[in-house]
């Protein structure tokens, strides 16, 4: 429609700019998380992630040793270098905690009680005092630390925080909870789409109604039920729960898709003597692949990202934590201020859904369009 | 047994069991219960075909009944009992709950959420859908705005915790305030009342993609003649959008709006991760979770209140579905 008069308006640059802006607003937070996950703790607290490609000015403190003091012409002098390995560049320095960057490198700073401090850019310092030096004097200075990116946060979180365990637990919950409902729902959807029986309309309405039942209602009675029959809080329990909760959407999506299949194929197969079971397994099921894929992606994302059901139906010990529970209940408390670790953990938990999302977006969109009720 | 192995076994048993059930039950129905006898084969085939739908439906109906229908009744019944569950107290849980200041805050905040999140998500979704419609790189833009849909509420909360961080070197909000000369960093999550809106924006961020995808498809479905006719009549782009396009996709907008409304009533993750319900940010689902495992009577009462709020939408959905079937 580009050639229609009026559509190629002067608005087009405004449209481009607004879309760029919107995309940036939507994207920037996630980029921030990704960048932060590769920075170490000191760098994160020293400068924002948006400045991460540039050198960071960081403040340090060292103590000159009072034992190194020598007396020269009635003045006590300590000489040395603030860098342990002898490498680095001092930007500014100072002798008091209250003003740690009072003087520029190479200047001579007058301190209290007639003491002086001179710090060169290469780290060499000269500290003088008219009186005998009894306590180790502090030297404050700032240096430019080059930007540094490492996978250290990821290694830490995987090795010491049991995140690998949580990852496997999430996977363990997700895969059966995605596969099992599909088959159950497919049979039911076929019956609701292509079989004639009394009460079909009622059942379809019931499925539509159940789509919006809040999960919150199910928590207490079902946990009680699971405890009574001996399942308790366990992986089996959460698989069953996810299966039950996922069924309405599965049946609804699959039925809507199956109803749209061409009637001729199914009827001619029946005329040729195929039973309903054969029609379903040989014709309808293979033809419904796109709808099956749509639902599988939905259910996968939903179970992978779920916090509520996992908190209630899985045991609350660290052995069975899935990643969402691990982050929300453990890391945010125990590692609350450790932004790099938090970012790495969050990124581990969203990496798989993102890959699934970008590779199978087509099916996801199709599913959304078919079942935009849930 | 390791959970992973248990999982593989469950898949095998689950899938194998389903296939086995469907195959065997059909076989038994056709060969044993109603075999096509020599005298009158048609009668038995018909009888088998009356039973067969229920064979196909049984596992799904059983699971739906147990996991979604029974809980509605079970929760309501449990909410009539006291904390320990041994004494019938009628609507006692409801009366104490409605008198609780925490519940009132949660109800009020939830009201705000229901008002703001669906409106904002639909608005942004519609905006993006319209703006990207003719753009050469529109699909990439849409894909990027759609991306948060794949991220868990917990993950999204963490992402935004960085943005809201109470530190000008970590949080973008405070960095921008710093740029404009604010001296002290501000913890936006502790700003009474307004903190709710910062939490809501996280959900808007997630749901805009959903609204965009559906509305974008709806916009594409508008007959081009109507737009062309408007252009010939001299309508400007804004008039085309508001007077020609929006009225034609009103039905879809309503569906998107209600779908997000339902979601808002269920999501407890964001509040739970960001503030734990502190600083006056409690909403009904998170209020319910704070009583879960402590006072089942109160927890089920809250859940039932959520159910009652959802009920009108449920009835409307069912009526729509029935109307479509006719």
Image: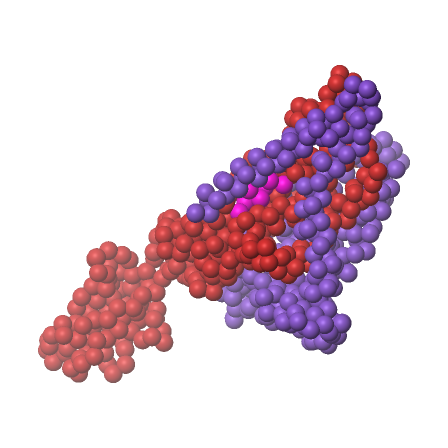
Chain colours: A red, B purple
Is residue A118 visible to the viewer in this orientation of the structure? yes
> Bounds of the magenta span?
A173-181
- Most foreground residue, B100 or A87: B100
- Most foreground residue, A74 or B29: B29
Instruction: Name the residue at 82% across, 21% down.
Output: B40
Instruction: Name the residue at 34% across, 71% down.
Output: A100
Whether residue B284 is in magenta: the answer is: no
Specify the quadrant of the image occupied by residue A84: bottom left
Name of the residue lying farthest toward the front: B39
Specify the quadrant of the image occupied by residue A272: top right
Instruction: Name the residue at 24% across, 69% down.
Output: A118
Using the image, determine if residue A203 lies above or below residue A68. above
Using the image, determine if residue B47 lies above or below residue A343. above
Using the image, determine if residue B146 lies above or below residue B116. above
The location of residue B68, given as percent across then percent down, is 70, 52
Q: Is residue B251 left or right of residue B111?
A: right
The location of residue A323, given as percent across then percent down, is 49, 52
Instruction: Name the residue at 50% across, 48% down.
Output: A170
The location of residue B59, given as percent across then percent down, is 68, 41
- Most foreground residue, B93 or A295: B93
The location of residue B39, given as percent across then percent down, is 82, 19
Q: Is residue B209 left or right of residue B6?
A: right
Q: Is residue B159 left or right of residue A156?
A: right
- Most foreground residue, B27 or A95: B27
């Amino acid at each position: 429609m580009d050639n229609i008069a009026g559509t190629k308006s002067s608005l087009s640059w405004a449209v481009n700019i607004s879309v760029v802006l919107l995309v940036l607003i939507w994207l920037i937070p996630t980029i921030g998380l990704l960048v932060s996950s590769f920075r170490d703790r000191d760098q994160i607290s020293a400068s924002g992630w948006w400045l991460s490609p540039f050198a960071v000015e960081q403040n340090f403190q060292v103590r000159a040793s009072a034992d190194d003091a020598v007396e020269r012409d009635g003045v006590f002098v300590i000489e040395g270098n603030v860098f342990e390995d002898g490498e680095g560049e001092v930007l500014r320095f100072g002798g008091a905690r209250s003003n740690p960057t009072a003087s520029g490198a190479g200047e001579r700073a007058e301190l209290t009680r007639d003491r002086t401090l001179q710090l060169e850019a290469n780290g060499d310092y000269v500290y003088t005092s008219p009186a005998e030096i009894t306590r180790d004097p502090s030297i404050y200075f700032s240096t430019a630390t080059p930007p540094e990116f490492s996978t250290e946060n990821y290694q830490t979180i995987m090795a010491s925080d049991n995140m690998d365990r949580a990852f496997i637990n999430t996977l363990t919950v997700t895969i059966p909870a995605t596969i099992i409902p599909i088959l159950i729902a497919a049979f039911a959807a076929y019956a609701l789409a292509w079989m004639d029986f009394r009460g079909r309309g009622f059942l379809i309405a019931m499925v539509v109604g159940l789509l919006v039942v809040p999960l919150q209602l199910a928590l207490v009675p079902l946990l009680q039920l699971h405890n009574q029959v001996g399942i308790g809080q366990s992986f089996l329990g959460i698989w069953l729960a996810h299966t039950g909760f996922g069924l309405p959407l599965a049946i609804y999506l699959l039925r809507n898709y199956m109803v749209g299949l061409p009637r001729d194929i199914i009827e001619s197969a029946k005329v040729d003597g195929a039973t309903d079971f054969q029609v379903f397994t040989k014709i309808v099921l293979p033809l419904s692949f796109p709808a099956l894929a749509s639902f599988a992606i939905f259910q996968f994302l939903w179970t992978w990202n779920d916090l509520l059901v996992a908190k209630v139906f899985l045991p609350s010990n660290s052995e069975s934590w899935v990643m969402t529970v691990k982050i929300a209940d453990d890391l945010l408390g125990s590692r609350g201020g450790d932004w790099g670790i938090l970012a790495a953990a969050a990124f581990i938990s969203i990496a798989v859904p993102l890959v699934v999302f970008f590779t199978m977006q087509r099916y996801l969109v199709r599913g959304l369009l078919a079942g935009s009720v849930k | 047994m390791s959970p992973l192995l248990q999982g593989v076994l469950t898949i095998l048993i689950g899938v194998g069991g389903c296939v086995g059930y469907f195959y065997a039950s059909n076989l038994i129905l056709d060969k044993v219960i109603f075999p096509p006898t020599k005298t009158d084969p048609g009668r038995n085939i018909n009888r088998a075909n009356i039973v067969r739908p229920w064979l196909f439906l049984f596992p799904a109906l059983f699971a739906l009944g147990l996991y979604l229908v029974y809980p509605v009744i079970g929760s309501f019944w449990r909410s009539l009992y006291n904390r320990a569950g041994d004494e019938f107290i009628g609507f006692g849980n409801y009366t104490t709950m409605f008198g609780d200041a925490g519940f009132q805050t949660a109800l009020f905040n939830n009201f705000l959420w229901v008002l703001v999140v669906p409106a904002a998500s639909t608005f942004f979704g519609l905006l993006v859908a319209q703006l990207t419609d003719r753009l050469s790189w529109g699909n990439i833009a849409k894909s990027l705005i759609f991306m948060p849909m794949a991220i868990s509420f917990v993950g999204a909360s963490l992402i935004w915790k960085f943005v809201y961080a109470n530190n000008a070197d970590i949080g973008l909000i405070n960095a921008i305030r710093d740029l404009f000369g604010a001296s002290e960093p501000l913890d936006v999550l502790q700003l009474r009342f307004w903190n709710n809106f910062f939490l809501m924006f996280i959900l808007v961020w997630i749901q805009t993609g959903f609204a965009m995808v559906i509305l974008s498809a709806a916009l594409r479905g508008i007959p081009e003649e109507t737009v062309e006719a408007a252009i010939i009549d001299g309508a400007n782009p804004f008039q085309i959008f508001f007077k020609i396009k929006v009225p034609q996709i009103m039905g879809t907008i309503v569906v998107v709006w209600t779908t997000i409304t339902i979601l808002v009533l269920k999501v407890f993750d964001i509040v739970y991760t960001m503030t734990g319900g502190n600083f006056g940010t409690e909403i009904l689902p998170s209020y319910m979770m704070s009583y879960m495992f402590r006072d089942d009577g109160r927890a089920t009462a809250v859940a039932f209140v959520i159910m009652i709020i959802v009920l009108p939408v449920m009835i409307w959905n069912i009526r729509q579905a029935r109307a479509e079937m006719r």
